[in-house]
Amino acid sequence: MSENALRVIGLTRKYRRNAGIFDVTFDVEMGEIVGIFGGELSGKTTLLRIIAGLCEADSGQVSVMGYDARREHVLAASRLGTVIEEPTFYEYMTARQNMRVIARICRDVDEYRIDEVLENMGLSLCGDDKVCDFSPAMRMKLAIGLAFLTNPRVILLDEPFKALSDTDREILKNTVLEMNEEFGTSFLITSRELDDFDGLCDKVGVMENGRITAFDIPENIAEMELREGERLFEESIGLRKPLGAEEETGE
Amino acid sequence: MSVLTGNFKNELQKLFMRPKYVLFLLLELLICLLSMFVNTAVIKLTYGDAAEAAAGIPANMLYTASLMFVPVVVFIAAGDMFSGERYDYSLQVLLVRPISKMKIYVSKIMALLVITAMFLLGMLVSSFIMEFAVIHTVENSLSVAVYYALNFVPLITVVLFAVFINQFSSNAGMSIFMCTVILLGVYALQVFVPFAENFVFTKYLIWHTLWAEQSSIIKLAQAGIVTAAYDIIFFIAGYFKFETLEI
């Protein structure tokens, strides 16, 4: 049996108006790259925020490398790299100073490692510039660099491709694949575009209204989404009755 | 370097990177200067000796520092460190890292205590400079310095009070306003309801007077216990709110 890098069991967090996530269960195995595909307000960010320890679940359990993300936060967080929502930094500091802040509280991060990560993320020339002057793409690169800084075993990336150009997307995909291959790092990546997971993910979960509705290899998910697209198209041009209407007629 | 020390350095760096704290230090010098001019003018009008005015500056400025100036600086710094970081979500940077909330909370308080000590020292040095400029000597420098050091202890309660209030708002401006209004309200209460003075946390803010008057050990112990009790209450209540907050 393969060991799980990340295990999410029955995670539920309810907000007002039926928003939130409900009974989310899935595993990310060691060295696996898993994508979570879903639209706006589908619950992707809430899921990642709970895993990262930024908010608490009403029920359910999350473990990172076998450590309970809530009760053993420090042990779990030391194995986790996180980029959630809009990346946040100390705006009045430079990229390098932001990295030093992390270096002071995490072991095994020295100036050499900071230079290495800045170089890998293509930020070595602007490492001494203040973050408030960074473009959205540069901010995303820095956030990803900060997540990679401690060489964590599991990395959470919340819509990392959103602010990036096509070239930067390819660079990020290659970086993810390299880290995965070289260090066996596991990834949980969310996106609103299924195409972002092409050639990247081992498995993809589909999240709708706070629930994981499908969890399979990318090819099967793509086929399922294609069929769903066709069905919606046929419904819109009147070739097929909407799903609810068919049920009503059947009754 | 331990995680706590590391983050303490982070918090200090964050505070010292904001130019407003350098301005506040310059403001201390300006306040001392203004205070000396006002004192000199008043004494000249009453046909007194101008040198008398300058000689009392360091001791007089301790009241200004302990009762108003340093508390306001502490409120602003606490607003930057707690509410401000919640407002711009930069607190997330630490919350997703391998550091417990207790260590984040304690390291921020330690940095606030350093700021408090720094501004008390700033006021002492500024007032000594003013005194020296006028009468070319510094009178009772050791005892005045000891009084400044003693007044650091009750200011710890002000730091913990500011931290506690900051847990109720994610807007730094609102937190500073709330802290200032409550502090002024407590001062007003002390004036208008003398009985209430025994129960407020600001009672011993100028407790160097107790030492100057050579009060009994029992009175000093009572002051210490009341101050420590408020410290414990504000620390625990503040941490409880901080521990449960979600960004």
Image (cartoon, coloured by chain):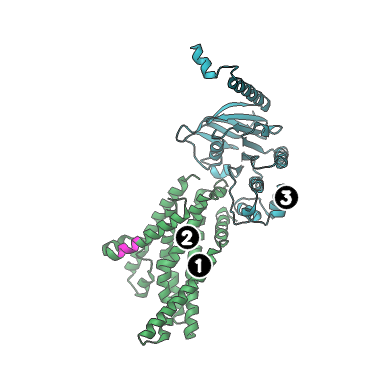
Chain colours: A cyan, B green
**Magenta residues, dominant SS class:** helix
Q: Determine contact: label 2, label 1, CB under 8 Å.
A: yes
Amino acid type assigned to the residue bearing label 2 in the image: Ile
Where B246 sits versus B192, above or below?
above
Location of residue A84 (image quadrant): top right
Residue count near mark 1 (Cα–Cα under 10 Å), binned few <14, some 14–19, many ≥20: some
Where B55 sits versus A244, above or below?
below
| Residue highlighted by disc 2 | B76
Where B19 sits versus A42, above or below?
below
Q: CA distance from mark 3 to mark 2?
A: 37 Å
| Residue highlighted by disc 1 | B24
Disc nearest the viewer among 3 and 1: 1
Residue A171 in percent (x, y) is at 72, 41
Amino acid type assigned to the residue bearing label 3 in the image: Glu
| Residue highlighted by disc 3 | A119
Q: CA distance from mark 3 to mark 1?
A: 39 Å
Disc nearest the viewer among 3 and 2: 2
- For image coordinates 48% across by 56% down, the residue present is B79
| Relative depth, front residue between A250 and A116 | A250
Which quarter of the figure is the N terminus of chain A placed in?
Answer: top right
**Residue under mark 1: which chain is it in?**
B
Location of residue A4 (image quadrant): top right
